[in-house]
Image (cartoon, helix red, strand yellow):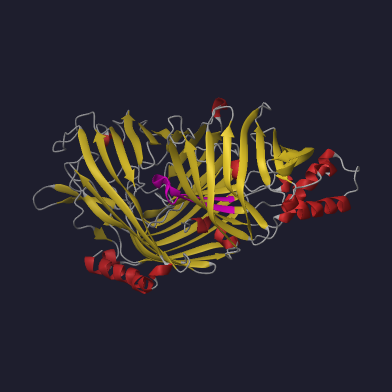
Amino acid sequence: MTNARAFLLLVLVFAPFSLAARDAAAGEFDLSGFVAFETRYFPNAPLFAGQGSAELSPSVVAEPEFVYEWNRRKDRLTFVPFARFDADDDRRTHADIREANWLHIGDGWDLVVGFERIFWGVTESRHLVDIINQFDGVEDVDDEDKLGQPMVNFRLQEDWGTLSAFVLPGFRERTFVDDDARLRGPLPIDDDDPTYDSAAGEAHVDVALRWSRTIGDWDIGLSHFHGTSREPRLIPTLRPTGEVVLVPHYDQIDQSGLDLQWTMEAWLWKLETMTRSGHGKRFVASVAGVEYTLYQLFETVYDLGLLAEYQYDGRDKANAPFTPADGDLFLGMRLALNDVQSTEALAGASFDRTSEAVLFFVEAERRISDHYKVELEGRFNFNAKNDVLLSNIREDDFLTLRLSRYF
Amino acid sequence: MLWTWPPTPRNSLPCLLVLLIGLWAVPAGAESPEEKGLAIAKEADRRDLGWQDSEVDLDMTLPNRNGESSTRSLRIQSLEVPDPNFGDKSLTVFDEPRDIEGTAFLSHTKILEPDDQWLYLPAVKRVKRISSVNKSGPFVGSEFAYEDIASQEVGKYTYKWLRDEPCGKLQCFVVEQYPRYEYSGYTKQIVWIDQGEYRVMKVEFYDRKDELLKVLVQSEYQRYLDQYWRPHRMHMDNVQTGKSTTLQFKNYNFRLGVDEDDFTSSRLKRAR
């Protein structure tokens, strides 16, 4: 998206601010957010020539949140800029507008105009129906970090459910790590000049619709998206220099999704399924699973959650973006100590049925005072040699230690 | 009730009224301790009908063994659900500690079934329906369990009146109540309710082994809309671990005109 259009959107979003300012006495301003210092530790030497070989890779990240509310909290302006400075990866050093929007809450409806992040779905190991935002691929490999998406979102709440309509001008390209960074494949990705299915390119206006409803123990969501795929295909391209690079290509797709959760006492039964056209032959992909919590384990106050999910993906391998989640079993455990420090840990593993590769991860966090939190994350792979994706990053096992100051 | 006579002059009129109403409602001697316990609970509930909705700020203090303490700061919006077959609805938003700022918790209280609960995680903008079968776990690391802070409804317990006795300057009914919820963390609670205004002054919680676990003292009551009493201080002592938690309430507001639409999982994303 061009700078001029981004600027125009910002002006549109913050125009109400000048109106609000006159009524400042009635409004309320709030600043929150965090700054964090983190370092990644790569115990193994890199697989590809040209990849940095630093064992410790530090970076600093900040995400403040400015909120201004007025009109008895019926109107709200939110501004969430984001920036990271990475010692080793020039691409991971980046900034983004995660959120910059005006929210108005009406009677039975609300409206969001501006940059916003949206989450749809219920499963843990893969987010299939969640499609509004582009992933910020340089942040982490877990697809949990998202770029801010410009939108107009109108939401209507009725007895028959909630209907949410989106108009999405301005496409966000996926971010990729630098050529000399870890966690990449053998070929460099050249994302300076991505290609598009649509003649409008990044200016294509996407649309989406979602209906959701709670009926007793069931939470149901149905959605449809029409527009530019957030997942690019990476096309091997020969440069005049003789170098082969991967160029992202963004197709036009239609994707319909269903997400479903049945909450039955200590059991959560989850299903996400979607069907997509535009990436070769129409295909179906699903994640289904269960989460069961053992409360007050062995008469302590600890809770232990057990997770199991199966991932199916029927995509056309030649014409759809590559996915590693095409027949994987995910097993995980979530431990909550329920203490004052909110100590929690999540550990799990994905087992690939065809390649027999295993990706193991652990995430743990603990508050260490009212303002600080420490987090430890690790990802390790086993038996990855035969796996198309994992084999590329088989030497890129890493541990991340993060200290965050919240304000 | 006669042996509580004479009441202190300040409280004589309400006490007299209570006495008269009590005598009129049920002929003396015909009431079993169970019936009397239930009648007290119903009367307390009846007196609290009609507040519609409220909003309050809450500071939670959790002292540790080193004499330091952590604090939690949160806001609670509540919606009265008049139907006795359903509990009230509440929306809790955290302001502190800052790492969970914006985290919101929505609860639709049920009487005998698990509540319907959703959690909003602002970092990932995700609303999660959560299992609420376990009401006896600690609420954000405090000595309050979820079932202690959930709305109190008559149908959640069976009752037995034990005795009347002084509680501070007031006279109290002492009522034993037994949770009807299958997975409650308690076998019973003993509740001290003042006879003048039917306010809960103290609660003793007995664990699954029927041993005294916690003692809650509610104080600094203020009356709103000329009718509804709310404690501004709740102090919970865990007698088995020696830990404690204090809740301090401030800025109560009533009848803000919110409705069911403000207490839905889809609105939870907009909560702040």
Q: In which quarter of the image is the N terminus of chain A?
A: bottom left
Of residues A291 and B96, the one nearer the viewer is: B96
Q: Is the magenta region chiefly helix, strand or loop?
A: strand
Q: Locate residue A270 relative to residue A53 in the image: left or right.
A: right
Q: Magenta segment: does it hold A94?
A: no
Residue B262, picture quadrant:
bottom right
Decide which of A112, A250 is in the foreground and name it: A112
Chain part drawn in magenta? B90-107
Magenta stretch holds residue B103: yes
| Residue most extreme to the front | B9
- Is A230 placed above or below A345 here? below
Q: Where is residue B46 in the image (x, y as percent from the top left)?
A: 74, 55
Q: Position of residue B149 (x, y in %)?
A: 60, 44
Between B229 and A73, the one nearer to me in the picture: B229
Residue A216 placement (x, y as % from top left): 63, 51
Q: Which residue is drawn at 54% across and 64% down?
A: A157
Question: In the image, is residue B1 above or below residue A119?
Answer: above
Q: From the top left corner, tell me how far across and down residue A173 is, in percent.
A: 27, 56
Farthest-out residue, left: A241
